[in-house]
Amino acid sequence: MRILIYGLGGVGGYIAVHLAKTEHEIVGVARGEHLEVVQKKGLHVSCDEGDFVSRFEAVNEKNLSGLFDIVLFCVKSYDLEQAALTCKPFLKENSLVLCLSNGVEHGDELRSLLDAKVLDGCVYILSHIEKAGHIKKLGSVFNLVFGGEGSEVLASVLDEARLRYKVPENIELAIWKKYIFISTFGVLTSYFDMSIKEVYENHYEEAKEYLKEVSMVGKAKGIEIEEEIEKSLQTASKLPLSASTSMHKDIKAQRKDELETLCGYLVREAKRLDPKGALDGSVEMIVKYYEALLKLHH
């Protein structure tokens, strides 16, 4: 099969180097100096398993060609629409597409844009571009979670690449289990300019309250994630002291960030749901940090 990894950052790059070990044809989309290094020297990954380099076709999005059987979108949420429209001419009706960006809306967004089989999913990984052509993965965590028609095809490919994955019965619930964590700690690491563990140690009560409010929005949508409050806190307590969030890194570097996906979405959903009486409780803390980060960084 022909597989496209759209975005060779921390997520897409790590996945691509493993898929490149299979017999499938792998194509990766990247830009700038990162693309140039990957084209000339391959993509280097440093992780707990060791250091290794993989070579595969890497192109700028303007140079895409041919048809793809599987497309994994590994871009930031604000770039998804443009990435999907760029890929549209290169998809077949039975092509599988999956977005691994942060957020809970992306499957629906892709279904509105593409004539393809859209999977819903998310990925658990701590990784980033250390320098052009080099991906640094922190810790041993990796799990690709997805669901929908065609999941067995992607699962077979991931088996070949020896990449860990899970196909849960309720993919919407699974996505929200990740979202409650990344929303809370994406926002709080960015606001306090601290790592995840530092937020846990210094702003425990704020983190717990924020998690509760995310849980309330989920519940109003029929998604029960209350038990994730304590699980998220436990996860935060066990992470390496240096581990932060992609939104925190983007804000520190004065790049475009995912505030709207990780926080603005909750504010809008709370407003939409509250008139119906579905939201049992306030989301004052979510609104507080959303407005504060808008003022500070936008």
Image: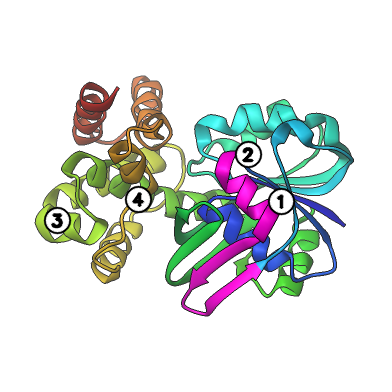
Instruction: Look at the image and tell me whether residue 203 can be seen.
Output: yes
Q: Mark 4 or mark 1, which is nearer to you? A: 4
| Vertical placement of residue 292 versus 242, above or below | above
Q: Mark 3 or mark 4, which is nearer to you? A: 4
Q: Which residue is mark 4?
A: 245
Q: Which residue is mark 3?
A: 204
SS type, badge 1: loop
Whichever of labels 3 and 1 marks the residue nearer the N terminus, that label is 1
122 in the magenta segment: no
Q: CA distance from mark 2 to mark 1?
A: 10 Å
Magenta extent: 31-53
- Number of the label disc, if any, that sits on residue 207: none
Q: Which residue is mark 1?
A: 148
Whichever of labels 3 and 4 marks the residue nearer the N terminus, that label is 3
**Residue 111 in the image, given as x and y percentages of width and height:** 70, 33
Q: CA distance from mark 3 to mark 1?
A: 36 Å
For the point 87% across and 57% down, which residue is it?
A: 1
Whichever of labels 4 and 2 marks the residue nearer the N terminus, that label is 2
Q: CA distance from mark 4 to mark 1?
A: 28 Å
SS type, badge 4: loop
Residue 15 lies in what quarter of the image?
Answer: bottom right
Name which residue type carries label 1.
Gly
Whichever of labels 2 and 1 marks the residue nearer the N terminus, that label is 2
Q: CA distance from mark 3 to mark 4?
A: 17 Å
Badge 4 density bin: few <14, some 14–19, many ≥20, Cα 10 Å: many
